Image (cartoon, helix red, strand yellow):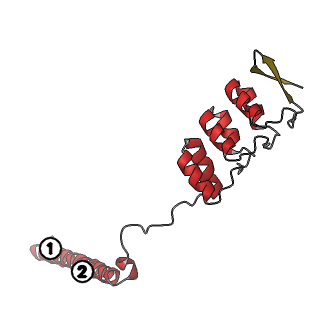
């Protein structure tokens, strides 16, 4: 190679490098211009005017029966009284047919059992399997609640879905729970 060929190659390389730099500069300018346009469109869009905090959506709405049953389970007699005065059904039940009285018996809450009975709860209400609060008290071995329910009109003759009748044996006036088929 001669000096002039080397110079020509050098000039060609410089032109190529200049073209590459110019192309990169144009591309960079295009990207910046597009980003600027995007930011401008965003700043004038409806989305930008919305708060970045989520809107307060409606809170979960519980059915009146759920509120009533929950108040009974918490033992809040004042709230239960208020719900009853506002029209709550004292014998409302879960999908399994359990009333507040059933659940209070199962949870061994004698104060709520007394409160519900005094306010007209059905002591002979049957769940989906035919169990009454008395069946539940007997099964749970809660003699005090068994005695209370018997004193407040619980029917000893009700038979559940499994044809199990309730038999109470009295020894020294203390009911002892038994089931028989």
Question: Which numbered disc covers residue 54?
Answer: none
Above-or-below relation of 101 to 142: below
Q: Dot 1, crowdedness within 10 Å: few (<14), some or many (≥20)? A: few
Spatial CA distance of label 1 from label 2 is 28 Å
- In the rendered image, residue 53, in percent from the top left (x then y), is placed at 37, 67
| Front residue of 10 and 160 | 160
Residue at coordinates 71% horizontally, 47% vertically from top-left? 120
Above-or-below relation of 123 to 17: above
Above-or-below relation of 17 to 95: below
Q: Which of pointers 1 and 2 indicates the residue nearer the eye?
A: 2
Residue at coordinates 74% horizontally, 27% vertically from top-left? 139
Residue 115 found in image quarter: top right
Residue that mark 2 sits on: 29
Q: Going from the N terminus, do you reach mark 1 or mark 2 first?
A: 1
Above-or-below relation of 25 to 127: below
Residue that mark 1 sits on: 10
- In the rendered image, residue 148, in percent from the top left (x then y), is placed at 71, 31
| Front residue of 98 and 96 | 98
- In the rendered image, residue 101, in percent from the top left (x then y), is placed at 69, 41
Quadrant position of the C terminus in the picture: top right
Q: How many marks?
A: 2
Residue 81 seen in this snapshot: yes
Apparent side of residue 114 relative to residue 168 in the rendered image (left or right):
left
Residue 109 seen in this snapshot: no
Residue at coordinates 26% horizontally, 78% vertically from top-left? 32
Q: Dot 2, crowdedness within 10 Å: few (<14), some or many (≥20)? A: few
Apparent side of residue 78 relative to residue 54 in the rendered image (left or right):
right
At numbered mark 2, what does the secondary structure look like: helix, strand or loop?
Answer: helix
At numbered mark 1, what does the secondary structure look like: helix, strand or loop?
Answer: helix
- In the rendered image, residue 117, in percent from the top left (x then y), is placed at 69, 42
| Front residue of 5 and 23 | 23
Pointer 1 with pointer 2, Cβ within 8 A: no
């Amino acid at each position: 190679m001669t000096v002039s060929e080397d110079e020509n190659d050098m000039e060609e390389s410089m032109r190529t490098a200049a073209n590459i730099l110019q192309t990169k500069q144009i591309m960079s300018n295009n990207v910046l211009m597009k980003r600027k346009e995007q930011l401008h469109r965003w700043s004038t869009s409806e989305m930008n005017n919305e708060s970045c905090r989520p809107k307060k959506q409606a809170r979960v709405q519980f059915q009146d029966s759920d509120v009533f049953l929950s108040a009974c389970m918490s033992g809040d007699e004042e709230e239960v009284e208020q719900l009853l005065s506002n029209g709550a059904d004292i014998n409302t039940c879960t999908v399994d047919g359990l009333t507040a009285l059933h659940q209070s018996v199962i949870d061994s809450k004698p104060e709520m059992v007394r409160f519900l009975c005094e306010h007209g709860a059905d002591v002979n209400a049957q769940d989906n399997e035919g169990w009454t609060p008395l069946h539940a008290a007997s099964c749970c071995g809660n003699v005090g609640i068994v005695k209370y329910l018997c004193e407040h009109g619980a029917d000893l003759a009700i038979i559940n879905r499994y044809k199990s009748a309730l038999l109470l044996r009295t020894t020294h006036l203390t009911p002892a729970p038994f089931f028989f088929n």
